[in-house]
């Protein structure tokens, strides 16, 4: 169907620059999304959410579900995003998600295990929420660790 | 019909450490994806030094960039096909001009090809 087509020698350089800008743009938006949820580590679900929210990145929606289809925490966090009105509300929803379904906690721990550098930073964060969600002081203490 | 190379490679992700050909995939992972170290370096330049990136997020971006290359190449190829041209060249001159003006416009131009 396609006739043979050639590529100018200038195209690879152009594509490499385009890819670099694309990575920077996507990373920045994913980081902004992570910041909104008070997270210090950029997660795949942040990247997936950015892709779903941005119209110009519709061509990426085909590969995201396959990559994150078994990431059940993603659904819980999506509910959190829908509930964003106040920080307390987000905390409560986050805690309820984990307490209601032990498997979600397992997924979160597995994911934390994959982050070698951030392992200690992530688990206390979760524990703090589960232990006493309404105690803002406790959350501040956990965040400072 | 354009066949994105990222799709068959997706099933071969478990083949990451091996340089041998895997029956589960037509392509080796290093043939489908850009080097993850380069992607990681570019990502870190965009974030403050105290921020971390999960390895899964880097792998997700690896797939996204491969899909981006396939998408742009397919769009430009269709455009050249419609104009009966065999070499993808004129678009290069136009986009280089835009690149010199503003990088943001450059990326948006690609998105709206």
Image: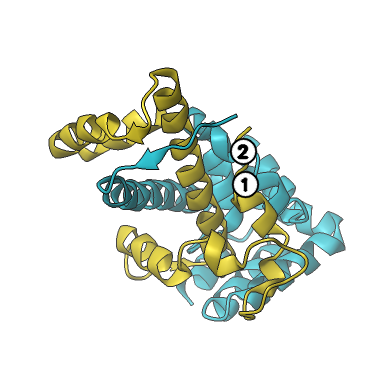
Chain colours: A cyan, B yellow
User: Can the viewer see residue A86 in this picture?
Assistant: no
- Asked whether, in this view, residue A97 is left or right of residue A80, the answer is right
Q: Nearer the viewer, mark 2 or mark 1?
A: 2
Residue at x-position 52% and y-position 61%: B33
> Vertical placement of B75 versus B17: above or below?
above
Percent x, y for residue A15?
Answer: 34, 47
Q: Are marks 2 and 1 on the same chain?
A: yes
- Residue A45 higher or lower than A62, as above or below: below
In the picture of the structure, the residue carrying the numbered disc 2 is A61
Residue A23 as seen in the image, left or right of residue B21 = left
What x and y, as percent, mark residue B90? Answer: 25, 29
10 Å crowding of disc 1: few (<14), some (14-19), many (20+) = some
Residue B41, percent across and down?
36, 68
Circle 1: element type = helix
In the orientation shown, which residue stands out farthest toward the front? Answer: A4
> As drawn, is A83 to the left or to the right of A117?
right
The residue indicated by pointer 1 is A90
Q: Mark 2 — on which chain does it sit?
A: A
**Is A141 in front, or is B109?**
B109
Q: Earlier in the sequence, mark 2 or mark 1?
A: 2
């Amino acid at each position: 169907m396609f006739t043979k087509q050639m590529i100018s020698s200038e195209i690879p350089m152009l594509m490499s620059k385009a890819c670099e800008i694309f990575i920077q743009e996507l990373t920045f938006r994913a980081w902004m999304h992570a910041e909104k949820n008070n997270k210090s580590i950029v997660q795949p679900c942040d990247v997936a959410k950015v892709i779903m929210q941005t119209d110009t990145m519709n061509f990426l929606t085909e590969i995201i579900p396959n990559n994150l289809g078994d990431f059940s925490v993603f659904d819980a966090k999506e509910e959190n995003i829908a509930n964003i009105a106040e920080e307390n509300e987000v905390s409560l929803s986050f805690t309820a998600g984990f307490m209601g379904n032990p498997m979600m906690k397992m997924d979160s721990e597995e994911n934390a295990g994959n982050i070698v550098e951030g392992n200690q930073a992530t688990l206390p964060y979760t524990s703090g929420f589960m232990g006493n969600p309404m105690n803002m002081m406790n959350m501040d203490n956990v965040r400072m660790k | 019909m354009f066949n994105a190379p990222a799709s068959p490679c997706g099933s071969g992700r478990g083949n990451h450490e091996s340089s041998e050909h895997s029956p589960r995939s037509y392509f080796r992972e290093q043939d489908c994806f850009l080097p993850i170290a380069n992607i990681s370096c570019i990502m870190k330049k965009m974030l403050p030094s105290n921020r971390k990136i999960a390895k899964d997020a880097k792998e997700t971006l690896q797939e996204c960039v491969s899909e981006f290359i396939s998408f742009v190449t397919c769009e430009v190829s269709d455009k050249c096909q419609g104009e009966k041209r065999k070499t993808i060249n004129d678009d290069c001159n136009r986009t280089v001009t835009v690149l010199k003006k503003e990088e943001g416009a450059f990326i948006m131009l690609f998105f709206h090809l």
